[in-house]
Amino acid sequence: EVLKNSIAIVFLAFLLGACSDDEEETVEDGNWIRRSSFEGVGRSGAVSFVSGDKVYVGLGFDGDDYLSDFWSYSPEENFWVRVSDFPGLSRSGAVGFEIDGKGYIGTGYDGDIELSDFWEYDVSSDSWTQITDFGGSARYQAVGFSVDGYGYVGTGYDGNYLKDFWKFDSSNGQWEQIVSLKGEKRKDAMCFVIDDHAYVGTGTNNGLHETDFWEFDATMTDWYQLIDLDDEDEEYDIYRAGSVGFSQNGKGYITVGSYGSYVNSTWEYNPSTDLWTEKTAFEGAGRTGAISFTINGRSFVALGQGGSNRYDDVWEFDPDHILDEDD
């Protein structure tokens, strides 16, 4: 009987210790807040760009149809307004960026073929104009961003996994090929921009998840390798596909995506130390194919796909507040 009691005490201590460890490992640094749902149909593979104090969101796939509707969202007023539909072919997996207040949307997949057309959206007149086709091959699930008044598009899939990069000059409407990403080819990667530097990582190549992470210096027009997203010394487990990246107050962030199963962990990148810190996990349902955007120092994650579900929810992330499960 004494032996049985001793075993029970040891087992109970083990369970309490395990519970204590789990509590210590729960990350609560950062808070997710649900905002006004997207008013269009839920979708994955949408595209977005920010102009002024509004974000513009559209395109994507709802599980049955490829879409061409576009909407604007004001975080200050927390509501959505439909704007002029995208006039090109309906599509998902396109890229978008902003230059001098105008939005630029192109590439993608319409259910049959990869696309290379590009369009300019004038916010002031709510109108679209077709511009010069993308300089590289027709593709989808590429990354696009703007730095210092120029647009950049690269990686993706055209029947081959890609890592070429192209620079767009809105003053003359021309594309120029620049140095390729020096890492592996990939599709479904994420990127974010801090100051005049862009950061690209994650994604898949021939079924493998890529773990390398790269910084693009627009001034030098060159790429520099940073700490891997699976660094053993730092015990990182950041790599995934179909994730989103965004930046806020000089830091970069990655969240959602998949690696065998859906991944909701959120990580913060500090460019001054080249180190990552885990933050509070995304509080919505697990997903891929979401969008992210930052407006006036506020960051958001929205839409996406989880299994057969396409989502219309919108979440704001505040990295400087502790998790509040009731908001």
Image (spheres, rainbow, N blue to C red):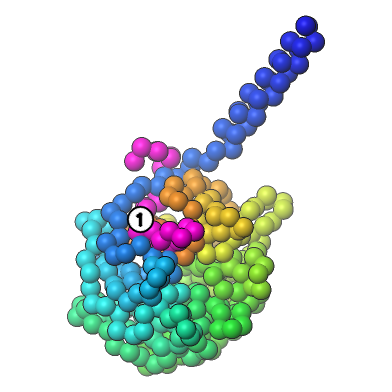
Q: Amino acid at mark 1?
A: Asp
Q: Is residue 300 left or right of residue 200?
A: left
Q: Position of residue 29 (x, y in %)?
A: 48, 42
Residue 1 quadrant: top right
Residue 12 painted magenta: no
Q: Position of residue 171 (x, y in %)?
A: 35, 89
Q: Position of residue 297 (x, y in %)?
A: 35, 57
Closer to the camera in the image, 100 or 282: 282
Decide: is 30 above or below 43: above
Which residue is at the far left? 125
Label 1 Cα neighbours within 10 Å, binned few <14 / some 14-19 / many ≥20: some
Closer to the camera in the image, 35 or 289: 289
The structure residue drawn at horizontal position 60% and vertical position 74%, both measured from the top left corner, is 186
The structure residue drawn at horizontal position 61% and vertical position 83%, both measured from the top left corner, is 160
Closer to the camera in the image, 27 or 167: 27
Residue 309 painted magenta: yes
Can residue 270 be spotted in the picture? no
Give the magenta range. Answer: 303-327
Q: Write down the residue under mark 1.
A: 313
